[in-house]
Image (tube, coloured by chain):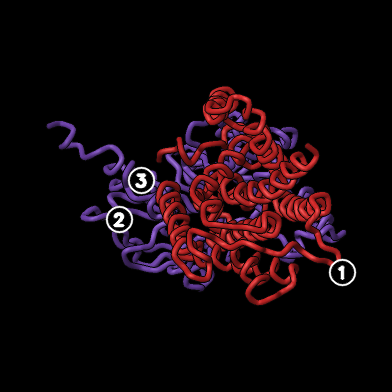
Amino acid sequence: MTAYILHLAIMAGIYIILTISLNLIIGYAGQVSLGHAAFYGIGAYVSTLAALNWGLPFPVALVLAILLAGACGLALGLPTLRLKEDYLAIVTLGFGVIVDLILLNLDITGGPDGIGGIPAPVFFGVSFRAKPLYLILVGLMVLFTLVLTLRLVHSYHGRALRAIRDHEVTAQVMGVNTPAYKIAVFTLAAGLAGLAGSLYAHYISFINPETFGLHTSILVLSMVILGGMGSIVGSLLGAVTLTVVPELFRRFHDYQDLAYGALLVALLIWRPQGLLGGGKMSLKFITRRE
Amino acid sequence: MSLLTVDSLCKYFGGVKAVDGVSFEVEKGEILALIGPNGAGKTTCFNVVNGLLPPSAGRVFLEGEDLTTLPPYRRARLGLARTFQNIQLFGGMSVMENVLAGGHLRRRTGTLAALLPLPGVRQAEARAREQAQEWLNLVGLADKADWPADALAYGEQRRLEIARALAQQPKLLLLDEPAAGLNPRETEDLMALLASLRDLGITLFIIEHDMNLVMGLSDRIVVLDQGRIIAAGVPKEIRNNPRVIEAYLGREEEEET
């Protein structure tokens, strides 16, 4: 039982990082991304390959995962962030599918079979295979993510991002370099997703493309919406809730997904701004038509 | 040298010549009004000047520097600010945050340093708040700093937009119909505010339909009709210019038919 709770806590921590990073893009900069799991996957595979094939220690693999996922975010962001709403949604969706297909078809990624035997992190000769230790590691990374993003959104950069979200044209007229901000936040979010991917891979020790497909992107998006767009603490809540609640619905067996879906629908009806979201912002990119 | 120079500016939308070869200058320290009937091309002219629309031809200079190909945020850095005809506040932010966002350009904190818990960063934030409070005092919103921006009354939203533009500390402020939707009393307050801005040394370039405001405030007036300048001069000249009267009221013969 304890192991099960520890497992949920670790997964919740990983999802918190993913959710916060996606919230930066959606809730703060007001851009859409339906392919966030792709960066999660890139992080997981890069870290895995770095550890297994090149024998690099975990911290180096982790940093590589962050940097490469970030670089992919930059590469995707540069040409696409001039697109708006629906178009950006389609492009990021497509990116997710492409990454999924690449992971499925490359030899180095093991195709659909994935890669197993990923080593647990080792610090100073101590293996972090044990769940309590791994939870501490994940907790530290969550803390790092929280501090970084909270400082970001409360700095004048955060204000510039929310200005872009509320009125991109006006933000630009006021002197905010909107393309640079959007690309920077997209890159940062992709890097953080890469961090989450690395943490996942070294925890589960086996990865295959299934984990990093569209359904994960949608799940993380749900976590962002549930917690509230534009609220970092909300993302934390959303991620924990959607990690734990489906487990509570296990007793409904075949109806588990139904109960889970019903919960989301109920939430969107009665609290469309999310648990901690700020008023009218949520779902803007779905409902707004200009 | 003029503060703003607009040289043979053209903006075509397909076959429509919204702005068709317009040239004028805005001198430092003056209030210049751009007037004309609806659809004369005034807002298009603003949009080209501040970079929201690329011109079809012609050029725009600020203090001799060619702005024509610069994106709006670069023009803002060079000292251009504006307000919008249909108010564009950041509705998700407080009144104070709107003005702080307007001061984005004036921050001297390093890009990454802003993320660190440094005393300098806190001081910069405190200074920015003080400064923003001053702008709010100036436009008469001092006691509503913590309100959500979209909870303000219409006239207050207009003033907040001006405060936000002032936070950029611009050399030239473009105001697109600042009196639109205001009642006579609010318009009077606005005139007093604009006059005080001129006294602060801010050059104003205003599109406005309220003739009381235009005649009472502007140093010079440029009249646009169907994308072309039909008259330019001091208010007295414009008031009695037959072409202007014609553009606004139509020709006498036309009215008879």
The kind of secondary structure element at disc 2 is strand
The answer to whether residue A268 is seen in the rendering is: no
- x, y (%) of residue B119? 87, 59
Crowdedness near tag 2: few (<14), some (14–19) or many (≥20) residues, C-alpha within 10 Å: many
Instruction: Identify the residue at the far left of this view.
Output: B257
- Residue type at mark 2: give it: Arg
Q: Could you say which quadrant of the image residue B58 lies in?
A: bottom left
Q: Nearer the viewer, mark 3 or mark 1?
A: 1
Instruction: Return the residue at label 2.
Output: B228
Mark 1: which amino acid? Phe
**Both marks 1 and 2 on one chain:** no
Q: CA distance from mark 1 to mark 2?
A: 77 Å
Q: Position of residue B4 (x, y in %)?
A: 49, 64
- Distance (Cα) linking label 2 and label 3: 10 Å
Q: Which chain is the one coloured red?
A: A
Label 1: how many Cα within 10 Å (few below 14, some 14–19, many 20+): few
Q: Amino acid at mark 3?
A: Gly
Tag count: 3
Give SS at disc 1.
Answer: loop
Q: Quick check: B109 left or right of A165?
A: right
Judge by depth and name the residue closer to the eye, B237 or B114.
Answer: B114
**Residue at the (38%, 62%) spot, across then down:** B54
Is B209 in front, or is B242? B209
Instruction: Name the subunit of mark 1.
Output: A
Task: Identify the colour of chain B in the image.
Answer: purple
Q: Which residue is mark 3?
A: B36
A27 lies left or right of B244: right
Residue with the mark numbered 1: A124
Q: Nearer the viewer, mark 1 or mark 2?
A: 1
